[in-house]
Image (tube, rainbow, N blue to C red):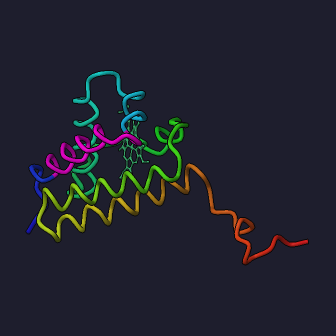
Amino acid sequence: MQVTEEMIERVVRGFYAKVRRDPELAPIFDAAIDGDWEPHLSKMMDFWSSVMLKSARYNGRPLPVHIAQTSIKPEHFERWLALFRENAVEVCPKSIAAAFVEKAELIAESFKLGMYGLPNPNRFPARPAPQ
Ligand code: HEM
């Protein structure tokens, strides 16, 4: 079974429908998107088409866009991924849902590194800070 543009559209539309109903994530998107979601949804379909089908329709730079959103906190990524997984299995065959989720997890990890840097090992009591 292959990924199709129809699946990409269902992944994107279904996911952002959940985001817009989510009390944690909706305020972040509502602040960034002024009224009309279609331009964002269409950009996200280009993005996922580039990721999954190598269509090269998206040629933006998403990391600086997320860095500029200072209200995004590390814990928002868990919620984002939970909704993404939930929707993917609702709208795609299982193996394709897993392929979308795998990409989303990798990209989320790289955004977190770019946004917050490497975890500080001195935070953990098991590894005391050097004297
Ligand atoms: C905590 C999690 C996340 C939050 C709260 C978040 C929020 C946002 C917001 C507010 C925008 C700007 C919307 C607009 O003006 O069009 C945006 C854009 C975008 N997001 Fe995220 N995002 C998150 C995670 C992710 C992840 C994991 C991916 C990829 C798998 C992703 C991909 C994108 C892309 C491609 C854009 C468009 C960037 C551009 O303008 O070229 N986001 N996101």
Q: Residue at x 53, y 46 (%)?
A: 73
Rendered view: 60 above or below 99:
above
Quadrant where the N terminus sits is: bottom left
Note whether residue 46 is visible.
Answer: no
| Residue 127 within the magenta-colored segment of the rendering | no
Q: Residue at x 33, y 62 (%)?
A: 103
Left-right relation of 123 to 46: right
Corner quadrant of residue 91: bottom left
Magenta range is 8-25
The overriding secondary structure of the stretch rendered in magenta is: helix
Determine the residue located farthest toward the front in the rendered image: 23
| Residue 116 x %, y % | 60, 52
Ligand 1 quarter of the rendering: top left
Rendered view: 108 above or below 63:
below
Note whether residue 119 is visible.
Answer: yes
Looking at the picture, tell me which residue is in the foreground, 106 or 83. 83
Looking at the picture, tell me which residue is in the foreground, 91 or 125. 125
| Residue 131 x %, y % | 91, 71
| Residue 111 x %, y % | 48, 53
